[in-house]
Image (spheres, rainbow, N blue to C red):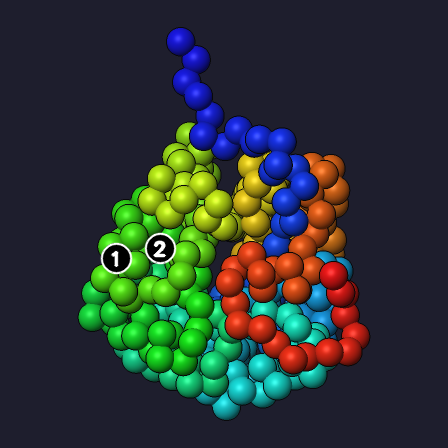
Amino acid sequence: MTKPSFSMCDAGTMSKPCIICVAITGSLPTKAHNPAVPITVAEQVESTHEAFEAGATIVHAHVRNEDESPSSDPEKFAALKEGVEKHCPGMIIQFSTGGRSGAGRTRGGMLPLRPDMASLSVGSNNFPTRVYENPPDLVDWLAAEMRKHDIKPEIEAFDLSHILKAREMADKGQLTGTPYVQFVMGVKNAMPVDRDVFDYYIHTVHRLFGKDAPWCAAGIGAHQLTLNEWAIAAGGHARTGLEDNVRLDRGTLAPGNAALVRRAAEICERNDRPVATWQEARRILGLRSTESTGHGRTA
């Protein structure tokens, strides 16, 4: 008996717009890895604008110090937010509350700036050389801050248990609306890139949050392309960008974030999935409206 695939698409999936998220910088890649990695706020705004024009409608943002080390400085986040709002009107701004840029509540010090979204890791797991710690009291505090400031969390699922934790938090009223879950695969010592697991993740999201619940997938390093292909073909949304992968292929550095976005957009085209405009992305994710107008792609 053949095992069913949970990611089989119905006819409606093929016409569903695909949201492309660009993770522009992260905490680890430096210009030594790829000179195109944007470090300063000005570089980040320019790179985000290029990615926006290429099709990205969410920017996942970290900030850096002058020495390229990760930072959690709210002033840097404020400057980045201002620049993106000016040059990429309507784009969804998502701040990272990840653990490499700060400890404890400093990880959420920028949330009063009210970005549209923020990443929320709801459980701990292993990273290549350390434990990525997300203790329950910190997770609860970050979730409360996001509710307080009307920020939609993106649930970063490094493990199946994180999806179930999101359901528990939603039942307790700690999350509003339908959670947006992102599967993160390919981090060394965490969840590897496994198709059966990926399919079961989709099944679990649909079982816990409904068949129309939006979800996304991110692959690390060379796995970025694989996860883009899997997610787009299965009706989900896609994350790309230099945070996760600095190369187009083994021998070619990506010339910028926009090149990785264009590659994801080409996968959308091959799968008859239109790339979501920022208006469509906001509707899909249930985000607050924006009065931003001006340049950029429109519905």
- Element class at badge 2: loop
- Element class at badge 1: helix
Label 1: how many residues lie within 10 Å, few (<14), some (14-19) or many (20+)?
few
**Residue 296 position in % (x across, y down):** 77, 70
> Is residue 154 among what the camera can see?
yes
- Asked if residue 185 lies left or right of residue 89, the reply is left
**Residue 89 position in % (x across, y down):** 69, 76
Q: Which of 121 and 193 is in front in this view?
A: 121
Q: Is residue 202 above or below residue 80?
A: above
Q: Which residue occupies 42% across, 65% down?
A: 153
Q: Which of 280 and 19 is in front in this view?
A: 280
Q: Is residue 280 above or below residue 270?
A: below
Q: Which residue occupies 41% across, 44% down?
A: 210
Q: Name the residue under label 1.
A: 171
- The kind of residue tagged 1 is Asp
Dot label at residue 127: 2
Quarter occupied by the N terminus:
top left
Q: Which residue occupies 45% across, 41% down?
A: 211
Q: Which of 34 and 232 is in front in this view?
A: 232
The first of marks 1 and 2 along the sequence is 2
- The kind of residue tagged 2 is Phe
